[in-house]
Structure formats: structure tokens, C-alpha cells
Amino acid sequence: MENLSPAFITTFEASERALTTEHLDVLYGGTIQKLFDTSLQFKRNSITALIGASGSGKSTFLRSLNRMNDTVATVNGKIMFHGLNVNQANINVYELRKSIGMVFQKPNPFPKSIYDNITYALRADGEKNQQKLATIVEESLRAAALWDEVKDKLNQSALALSGGQQQRLCIARALALRPEIILLDEPASALDPVSTSKLEDTLKQLREKYTMVMVTHNMQQAARISDYTAFFHLGHAIEYDTTTNIFTNPQGAITEAYIQGSFG
Amino acid sequence: MTEHQKDRFATGVIYFLVGIVVILLAGILGNILINGLPHLSWHFLTSESSDFQAGGGVRDQLFNSVYLLILTTIISLPIALGAAIYLSEYARDNWITHLIRSTIEILSSLPSIVVGLFGYLLFVVQFGFGFSILSGALALTFFNLPILTSNIEESLKGVSATQREAGLALGLSNWKTIRGIVVPAALPGIITGVVLSGGRIFGEAATLIYTAGQSGSLVDYHNWNPLSPTSFLNVMRPAETLAVHIWKVNTEGIISDATAVSAATGALLVLVVIIFNLSARYFGNKLYQKLTAAK
């Protein structure tokens, strides 16, 4: 039996924490446990990469943070956001998801115009001011580094964009709701190298204003853009430290084996 | 036989089989149109049907067919859409939903004559609606609902789960995600479902014989008051449709030009179905483009 107890878990001052999990367990079907006792703190205005082999629980963990696992799994433990445990039944998950946005593995723009993709959630929320909507569209697209490419075709279908552009549109769509945290579930895995590099540049720029937690299979990507890295194995958070330390001086034997490519 | 020869043989068999289907369908369609079109005239379309003499038209039957189609669609589309949304988006996988699905399957293969007799007992006799457009539309709704529901359910299920995730992750409620994203994305499939069921409604005779009746009442096309017994909009009047008319002139009819009338009516029915099909697709595509910015 491998030693699955944490090798090293970094912590931050309370004032630096954007999001914290305390003893998070995730169970599917009430019996199959996919995540064990995970307590991680995410630092404000940084990119944290979650790495690990398939089935290590990193995506399960990520999707629990904005309560996307509610319908498929039981999540026990605390998720602290602004001093409030948001993993409670009485929390308004719709409001929570506006503060904690999410970008998925495969670009999933709506089959609507570029403009409507960004404004749909705002309009569904009751925003009617066209001037304001137009401003938000431009700001969001600029922040996602997509404005120059699409400013002349905002009324065209988002599905006509390339995969990389679609993914940046999905980021812009999440940004339009003015979130504090953006969760990214392998956002570049469906993209070609050029689009990936553009996406990474975009994420690095967004670090100034947002806190990002990103699941990635690509260890070079984690090393390139993340400030902190958490390594997951078989549902346990084994090691969490600065990205430099994880990749150059890992404490745990399993972490080292994974970094060196011995498995996964 | 070599692999190559086997492949050519199988391809040949497949071409032969599809050829049979094409020849049969083209033959039927061609036969109906060639026999019917020469008898179609403006006079035929705009005059009343005749009970005894030759030279009657199908003005009322044509209107009744369209009117019944519209009424049935108005009644059944919202119900089917709601049921389909439930089955595709909300229903958990348990014995109740299995029961609902089996019921829908059984109902969709129910013979239309049984639906007709059921409609006769329930709407015509029990509810006292009499032989009327309303009874017909309600019976057709019964006939129509199962297929329409499962067609719409299929098209909703065809919308990728990632679209629902995208909506939820933006803080939209389940309902807003369904209404604003899933249903618009499924629109082409939903329209196909409506078109297919529309064709079935146009062609349906057995159900209507016992519910909407076989006799035409005197209809005044200038009377726009739906409550007036002579108004063409009155849903409580008996109404013979094109399909029922074909059945009637060929069984009970005593008009001397029964063959010509039924041939012309058949051709008209086919044409109306084609026109309905094309226009529903046209307007459906326009709506889809408006909702999705697709070209």
C-alpha cells in the first residue's frame, strides 16, 4: 500500500486566501469515494495548477468548488469563500457560480451569436441596459484577448470561430459575470499548440484581477503558467507547494515519480 | 469470391434494395399526382362538395383539414414539449419514468381506429361535444402526443451535455438553461417532429370519422364570430376533412364522379402536405437563425 498521506501542503495568511477547502470528501452513489479529506487554500491573484493521473480526483475536486457536482455526488466538508461555508444546502448556487466561474475542457459556446454568448446570462439575470451590455461585451472580450479578432463580427455565430477562439470566448463569457475566481478544467486539452499558447498568455494576464484554479494533464503547461501546483493521487492531495518546488524539489516519493513520468 | 467481389456484391444488393424503395415511393407519388392533378381546378378548390351530383369541390374539407391541423398542434405542442422536457431534462432513471416511456411507446402504436372510438366515447358522448372539430382535435391530440413527445425528447437529448454545463456554470437556473439554450439548440429537431406529426394529422381518417364526423355543415366564411354556429371558426361544428372525404366518396358516396373527386382530393392532400412541410421548415429555419445567429 502506497503512502497516501500528504507530503507537504502549503498554507497562506488568511488575508491572502481567495478560497479554502476543509476536509473535503466526494462520494459517488453514496459509497464510492473519489476524494478524501482534501484541505487546500488558494491564494488570491495566482494560478494554481491541479495535476495528477487520470482518476486522481483533481477534476472531481475542481467541480466541487462551484457546486457542479451537486447533482451527481455527495460532497462533505467545507468550502470557505469570504468567510462563508458555501458547501451548504441553503447557499444560492446560482449566485455562487457567478462569483466562481468555470471554463470546460471542450469549448462549449452556445449556438448563438458572439454577442449573445456573452450577454445571455446577464440578460437572463435581468440586465436590460443595452449600453451597459455592449460595454461589458467589449471589456470581457478585451480581457480574454479576443476583441481584436471578433469586434467586426459580434453578430455572427460563435460556432464559426476556431477552437481556440471559442475557448477564449468561453473565458470572456465567464468574465462578463465579474467573477472573483475562475475554475478551468483542462482548458487547453482540445486546442492546437498555437491556440494553447495564446490561451496561456491570456490566463497569465488575467492573474492580475482573478484567482484561477486549473486542472491540467500537461505538466509543461503547469510549469509554464502556474504559481502553485497541487499534486493529486488516487483521490488524495499529496503535495501542494510553489510550482518551482513541486517540479524541482518534490517532497513526496509519489510526487517525484509522477513528475519524472514514471506513471500517469 | 474474393474480398473485392464480395464488397461489390454487397454494394450491388444495397443499391438494389434502395432502388425498390425509391421506385415504390416515386410510383405511388407519381400515380397520385398524374391521376389527380388533371381533375384539380380552381372550381374544385373553391366550391362545396356535392352529395348527389357530379362537379362538387372540396372547399370546406380543405379548410377543415388545415383548421384541425392548427388546432391539434396548438393543443398538443405545448403538452408534448412539457412532457419531453420532463423526460429529457428532469426525469430520473427509475421505474416511474420507465413506465411513462413504455406507455408512450404503446400509445404511439395504438391503431388510429381505436383512438377514434375512444375519442367518440369520451369526447363525443361522455363530454357531449358531439361530432365536432373540438372532439376531432382532442382525439388527434391523443393520436399525436406519443410520437410528438418522443420526437421532441430525442431532439432535446441530442443537445450536448456540455451546453447544459455551460449554462449552469454561468449561474443560470436549470429552467433558464433549458429555455434559453437547450430548447433553441434543439429547435430543428422539434420542427421536424411537428412536421412529421402534421403529415400524420393531415392523412388521418379513421380517428376523425368517429369524432369530427363525416358531414359538412353549412359554413359561412364571412362570419368571424367563433361562437356562431355557421362560422367557419366554430369548433363545435362537425367537419369532414380531405382524408375522410376520400374515404367517404369511395365507400358511401353516390356521386357519379367519385373516382375523379377522390383522385383530385388525394393529389390535393399530397400537395398540401408538401407545402406544409416546406413552409414549416422555412419558417423554422428562420426562427433558428434568429435565435442562434446561424447562417
Image (cartoon, rainbow, N blue to C red):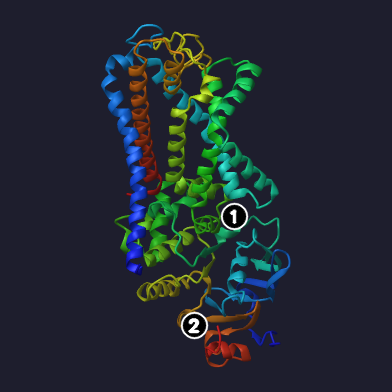
Which label lies toward us, 1 or 2?
2
From the top left corner, tell me how far across and down residue B95 is, in percent. Answer: 70, 49
| Res A168 → quadrant | bottom left
| Residue found at x 32% / y 41% | B23
SS at mark 2 in the image: helix
From the top left corner, tell me how far across and down residue B129 is, in percent. Answer: 59, 16
- Residue lying furthest top in this view? B52
Q: Chain of mark 2?
A: A
Identify the amino acid type marked 1. Answer: Tyr
| Res A17 → quadrant | bottom right
Q: Are marks 1 and 2 in contact (CB under 8 Å)?
A: no
Q: Is residue B294 visible?
A: no
- In the image, residue B279 above or below residue B240: below
| Residue found at x 56% / y 37% | B109
**A150 and B200: which one is in front?**
B200
Q: Which mark is residue A94?
A: 1
Q: Earlier in the sequence, mark 1 or mark 2?
A: 1
**B84 and B148: which one is in front?**
B148
For disc 1, the neighbor class at 10 Å (few under 14, some 14 to 19, many from 20) is: some
**Tag 2 residue:** A219
**A145 and B46: which one is in front?**
B46
Q: CA distance from mark 1 to mark 2?
A: 33 Å
- Residue lying furthest left in this view? B38
SS at mark 1 in the image: helix
